[in-house]
Amino acid sequence: MVVIREGTGSLSQRLYEALSSAILSGSYEAGAPLPSSRALAAQLGISRNTVNSVYERLEAEGFVAIKASAGVFAAQGAYAPKKPPSRSRDSDYVGFRKKRNDIADFKSGLPDGRHFPVAAWSRALAAALKKASPLVFGYGEPEGRPELREAIASYVGRYRAARCAPNQILVTAGTTQAIGILGSVLLSGKLRDAVVEDPLTQDIKSILQDRGARIMAVPVGETGLDPSLIPGKLKPALVYVTPSHQYPTGRSMPIQNRIALTEYARRVGSVVIEDDYDSEFRFDGPPLPSLQGLDPDNVIYIGTFSKTLSPALRCGYLILPARLIRAAREAKWLSDLHNPILDQLALADFIKSGRYARHIAKMKRLYRARRACLAEALTRTCEAKGVEFEIIGCAAGLHLVVRFPGRRFGAAELESLESSGAKAYPVSVHSLKPKAWEDSLILGYGSLDEAEIETGVKSLVKGIASIETI
Amino acid sequence: MVVIREGTGSLSQRLYEALSSAILSGSYEAGAPLPSSRALAAQLGISRNTVNSVYERLEAEGFVAIKASAGVFAAQGAYAPKKPPSRSRDSDYVGFRKKRNDIADFKSGLPDGRHFPVAAWSRALAAALKKASPLVFGYGEPEGRPELREAIASYVGRYRAARCAPNQILVTAGTTQAIGILGSVLLSGKLRDAVVEDPLTQDIKSILQDRGARIMAVPVGETGLDPSLIPGKLKPALVYVTPSHQYPTGRSMPIQNRIALTEYARRVGSVVIEDDYDSEFRFDGPPLPSLQGLDPDNVIYIGTFSKTLSPALRCGYLILPARLIRAAREAKWLSDLHNPILDQLALADFIKSGRYARHIAKMKRLYRARRACLAEALTRTCEAKGVEFEIIGCAAGLHLVVRFPGRRFGAAELESLESSGAKAYPVSVHSLKPKAWEDSLILGYGSLDEAEIETGVKSLVKGIASIETI
C-alpha cells in the first residue's frame, strides 16, 4: 500500500517521494517487486502515465529496475535508513550578539550607522540597476569594475596624494581580504618574515600567520614604527604599517620616518603595506599625504569604505605597484572571483558625483565634535573624581587612546566597568609584548552621539575610580 | 619665492602642498630658513594666521622646526625626491575582455543576464534599505544575517531535500570562497588528501592545493565518482563531488553511488563536499534529492545563487555539520568578515516572498527550451554534414557535453572553430589525466537565445566538419 502525502507539490513529485523514501528506508528490499503501474494508478486514482513517468525517473536515479513484461523491482544498494543528524550542542550555536541599550559601548572603528546616506545610496543603486547592461549580471573581472577603479584612482590622487593609474587598483571585500591577498602574494618559500607594528590588530596577525608568516613585531614609539629597530640581517617579505593613524595607539608617523621607511624597503628589496583605514577623518589639519605617494614602486596602499561609508558594504581596495598586479588579481580570483558588481557600480557613481566627498565632510564635522565632547567630558570628569589620565593618539579617526597611570585593565576590571555602564577596550589585547599597555583603554566615539558620550564617560570614570591603583 | 598652485582646494591646503613639496624635493635643504610668516603673508596677500596654521601643521608632520624668535627651518630627514613610478609593461595591464558580438560563445555556467529580474530585485533592495535599522550599516556576523539563513534553510529543505537548521548555514561570497573556507577548515597537518572527480574545474584544484591539499583524482564514470576506486589505505580529509550534475561531464550520480559514498565517508571518518551548483535546472524530472539529506553529519552542502539568479551577486552558502560550524565561521571572518549586509537582506526578502522560486521556474522553462533547441540543432546539422557525435550529460544545468568521435580539440582546432564563428570549450583542459576527453566539447546554452544557438551550431558544425578526423 503506497501512501502519498497530502499537500503541495505535484502528484507525481509526491508519488516519487513516497516511493523513493520507501526504498531508501528498506520498506522494499532489494529485488522486491513494486506495484504494477496499473494497480498503483487504480489505487491512487491517477493516470498510468503519471505512474510510469515516476517509475522511469526512479529507474534513472537507480532506485528501481524495470524489467520488460516482468515488472518493477527495488534496486540493489538503494537502502539507506535515515540517520538523524547529531544534535548540535549549545556551544555550536552561533547567534547574533545582542546589543545592550543600557551600556555606552566605546567600540572603535565603527562609523555611525544612523548617518548612513540611505536616500543617496538608494538612488545610486537604483540608477546602477536601471542602466545596467545584461553583461553586468554575469561574471566580472577580479580587479573590479573599470568605473569604480577610475573613481578610486581619481579620489586617492586628489585626497590622499597617492599616485596611481586605474589599472593599479584592485577592488577587495574590505581590508581583511586585502591583507589576505597580500599575504598570499608576498609570502612564499623563504620569504616569510613579516614586520608589523606592536601593538597590532589581532586579526591581522592571524591572517598573515595563516599564510605562513613569521611575525617580527617592532614596538610603536611616539612617531610610529622606526625602521632602524628592524634587525639588520632580516630581509622581510613585507612591512605592515598604519602610518596615518596607528591602530590602536592612534599615533601618526612624521615625514622623517616615512622617508626612512620607504628607503629601508628600497634598500632591502622589501615592500611596505600602508593600511590607511581611517585617515580621512583627520581633525588637526588635513589628512597626511599617503606613504604610497612618496614611493609608488615600494608601497602598497590599502584603502577602505568601511569607516567613511559603512563596513556593511564590505568594500575596499589595493593600490599595487605594477609588478604585483597579476599575482594579486589571481589571488582575488581564487578568493571569491570578484566583488558584487551592482554595489561597485553604485559606489562608482556615488564617488564620481561628489556625494562621497560631501558625506565624508559631513561626517568629519560630526566626529570632530564627538572627539571634542569625549576629550572635554573625560577631562572634566577625571578631574572631578581625581583620576589621573593622559589622552594620546587623538588627531584622527574614530577612536582615541587614554592612559590611566597606575591602573591596570584586566578581564575583571573590564567587567566591572561594564557593570558600571561603559564598555571599553584594552590596548593590551593587541600588544604582542606581554604586560604592555595594561593601563590604556581604546575609546571609540564613532557610533555614539554626544549625549551617549557624556553618559558613557560618567559611567566609565566612576568605574575606573573604583578600581584600586597599583 | 613660494608659488602656490591655482585651482581648487583651500588656500591653506595649497600653501601646505607647495611648502611640503618644496621641502620633500630639496628646494629647502635641512636647516634652511623658510620665509617668515609676515613675509609670506605679504607676498601671497593672505593672513598671517593662515600661514602660521600651515607652519604648525608642517611642524606636526615633521617637515619644519619652529624655533621661537629665530624662525621656521626645514627639518632634518624631510628630503625625498619623488621617484617616478616604474612604467607598467603592457603585460601588467589588466583590462576588460571584449565580448565579440559576431561569435556565438558557448561558455558554460552563465545564466542569461537579459532575464535578471531587475524590477523585482530593485524593489527588494529598496525595501531592505527602507526598513534597515542603523545596526545594519555596521559590522555583521561572519555566518550571515539570520533572515537570509532562515530563508535558505527553508528553501533547501523544501526544494533540495536537505536537512538543516538555520544555524548550520554560513553565507559565503559564492562557491569559490565556500571551497576555500572548507579547505582551510578540513586540511591541516597530516590530513591533506583531497579526493576529487576527474575531470574537475581547474580553479577548484588550485584553491585546494593553495591550502596544502594533495590531490587524489578519481575518474568519473557513467555514474559519477565511484568510492570503491579510492585507494583503501587513504584517509582523505575530504571528498569533493558534484553529484547532481558533474562538472564538466554533466553526469548524475544514482542513489547506489550516493549511499556508497556517504557510507565510505562514515567508515573512514572523512567528509563529503557536495557542490550543488546548478541542480535547480534539472529538466528530466525534478531535481535529485541532495546527498546532504542522506547523511547530514558527513556531508557538507555548497549552494549558490550564481546560476539561479546572477553570479554578479557573489552569494552562496554552506550547510555544515554542527562540529564544523565554529571553524568555518572563523575562516569566513578571516577571509572577508562577512558578506555585504544589504544584499543579504534583499535576497532574504526575495526568497521568502516566493519571487526566487518563481524566477527559477521561469528560467527553467527558458533553459529547457534552449537545451532542446541545442540538441535538435546539433542533431540536424551534424547529420546533414555527416559529422558523428554523441550528446552526454544533458539532464540538467546550463551546459551539455558532446563527443565527436575521431576528432581532437587542441588549441589550433579551437581557434579554427572560433574563426568559423563559434567559441566552444574543451573538456580536456579540466582533465587531470593527460590525453583524456580530447574529443569532447562543453557547450553552455544558458546565455544564448534560440536564434543565437541556431546560428552558433551552424558555425560550430561547419568548423568541426573541416577538422581532419584522426
Image (cartoon, coloured by chain):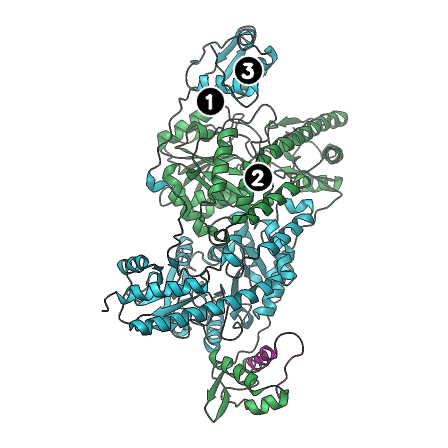
Chain colours: A cyan, B green
Instruction: Please give the chain letter of the residue carrying mark 3.
Output: A
Residue that badge 3 annotates: A55
Q: Are marks 2 and 1 on the same chain?
A: yes
Q: CA distance from mark 1 to mark 3?
A: 16 Å
Label 1 vs label 3, nearer the camera = 3
* Mark identifier at residue B147: none
Q: Position of residue B89 (x, y in %)?
A: 63, 62
- Residue kind at label 1, given as amino acid type: Gln
Q: Residue at x 53, y 53 (%)?
A: A313
Q: Residue at x 48, y 43 (%)?
A: B171
Residue that badge 1 annotates: B256
Instruction: Please give the chain letter of the residue carrying mark 1.
Output: B
User: Quick one: B295 or B183, which is closer to the camera?
Assistant: B295
Q: CA distance from mark 3 to mark 2?
A: 35 Å
- Secondary structure of the residue carrying numbered label 1: helix
A194 relative to B427 in the view: left or right: left
Judge whether residue B329 can be spotted in this image: yes
Q: Tag 3: Cα neighbours inside 10 Å, few (<14), some, or many (≥20)?
A: many
